[in-house]
Image: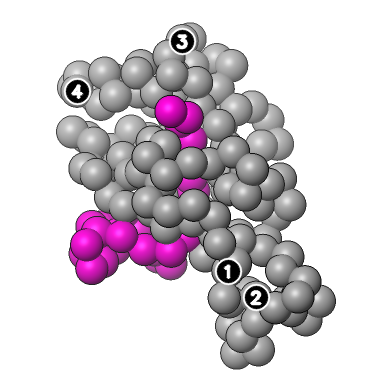
Amino acid sequence: MNYWLIKSEPHVFSFDDLLAAPDQTSPWEGIRNYQARNFMRDSMKKGDTLLYYHSSTQVPGIAGIAEVASKAYPDPTQFNEQSPYFDPKASQHNVRWVLVDIKALRKLERYLPLAELKKQSTLADMRLLQKGNRLSIMPVTKPEYDFIVKLAKKPASS
């Protein structure tokens, strides 16, 4: 099993939105970065665990745990001219973008703000915390994942 962190802007699609989706499952659409696409296409497997991160918000941080619920398949928004994710270079014969379905598993015991994650020496090498890393999907090591899950069970430090 692999571990990943996926980012979403909560005003676009929050973890609560995923929890409210039918079967707590939704397509993870609109990814338009080649490295993130390659992670989905080549490395993500059904059953992989996801940390769901809220980005571009006043207090960015990790909100919940989800899982990959499907293998990668063509993102239909690339073909829809009305979609903000439309790609005029894409066609049914030239699929450029893929997505996976994701399924919510549970909220963390408490929201883990980015500022708190940055204070954890155990997470010093985590890709999320590296300067300039803006990918919407990134791998997480099992020790990083385990530490984050344990950290969420502890009261927030002041």
Question: Does residue 119 appear left or right of residue 34 in this picture?
Answer: left
Q: Earlier in the sequence, mark 2 or mark 3?
A: 2
- Tag 3–tag 4 contact (CB < 8 Å): no
Is 120 or 136 nearer to us in this picture?
Answer: 136
Residue positioned 81% across, 76% down in the render: 89
List the residue tagged with mark 2: 78
Number of residues whose C-alpha sits closer than 10 Å to that of mark 1, classed few (under 14), some (14–19) or many (20 or more): many
* 81, above or below 104, in the image: below
Foreground mark, 3 or 1? Answer: 1
Q: Element under label 3?
A: helix
Q: x, y percentage for residue 78?
A: 65, 75
Residue type, numbered disc 3: Thr
Which residue bears the numbered disc 1?
A: 75
For the residues labelled 4 and 2, the Cα–Cα distance comes to: 40 Å
Residue occupied by mark 4: 153
Quarter of the image where the C terminus is located = top left
Residue 88 to residue 25: above or below: below
- Residue 84's tag is none
Q: Earlier in the sequence, mark 1 or mark 4?
A: 1
The quadrant holding residue 110 is: top left
Q: Please indicate whether residue 37 sits to the left or right of residue 122 in the image.
A: right
According to the picture, the residue beneath numbered tag 3 turns out to be: 122
CA gap, disc 3 to disc 4?
A: 16 Å
